[in-house]
Image: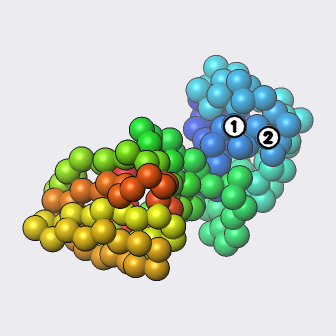
Amino acid sequence: MQSPEGVGRRMRAVRQRFGLSQRQLAKRSGVSNATISMIEKGSLSPTVATLFKLLSAVPVSITEFWEDDYQAPARVFYRFEDLTRIQGNKITSWRVGKGTPDDSMTFEYERYEPGMDGGEVHIDQDHEIVGFIIEGALDLTVGEERRVLKAGDAYRFNGRIPHRLRVHGRAPVITISCSVPPVF
């Protein structure tokens, strides 16, 4: 029999493999967010009924849950509400597949609010950043180059090069971007 801490670690791993927040799992399973939090911290041992509810919210059987070498199958489809929402100052992004077994990239739908200026960014790791402007105008500086990109334009650069993103104008900017490997 596993300790409550062991069950909690296993439950967290299952939830994260499917890219779900505790709130998303709570909504899908009907188990409260507070209960999920206590289970994952090891301060509450779930009843069999609660465990069944949680596992029915993701495609994992009770037998698979207890297997030592359990690996969640790769997820293929995501509804908007399944995406991991990340809220920042004048930036909101929705990440596809965060916490999946193959975290080889970050793929996001992003919304930058008017007035957003990300400041200069320099990351000490080689990685490719690629994106498309869907709506609005983005002022992008990469090294010594600067361009205002509009809907339909795209960018690709090594994130090690100092770069800066700013909203150009008074309309929000919508982008789709990918970073390989993920750095955020």
The residue that label 2 is drawn on is 27
Left or right: 124, with 95 as reference point = left
Q: Which amino acid type corresponds to the residue marked 2 in the rendered image?
A: Lys
- Residue farthest to the front, as pictured: 170
- Residue farthest to the right, as pictured: 49
Q: Secondary structure at mark 1?
A: helix
Left or right: 175, with 12 as reference point = left
With respect to residue 177, does 168 lie above or below? above
- Residue farthest to the left, as pictured: 144
Q: Between 118 and 180, which is closer to the camera in this rendering?
A: 118
Measured Cα–Cα span from mark 2 to mark 1: 6 Å
Q: Between 41 and 110, which is closer to the camera in this rendering?
A: 110
Q: Position of residue 123 (x, y in %)?
A: 20, 55
Image point (56%, 54%), residue name: 94
Q: Are marks 2 and 1 in contact (CB under 8 Å)?
A: yes
**Quadrant of the snapshot with the N terminus:** top right
The residue that label 1 is drawn on is 23
Q: Position of residue 133 (x, y in %)?
A: 45, 71
Image point (69%, 37%), residue name: 23
**Among the 4 quarters of the image, the one containing residue 42:** top right
**Among the 4 quarters of the image, the one containing residue 105:** bottom left
10 Å neighbourhood of mark 1: few (<14), some, or many (≥20)? some
Q: Secondary structure at mark 2?
A: helix
Image point (80%, 50%), residue name: 57
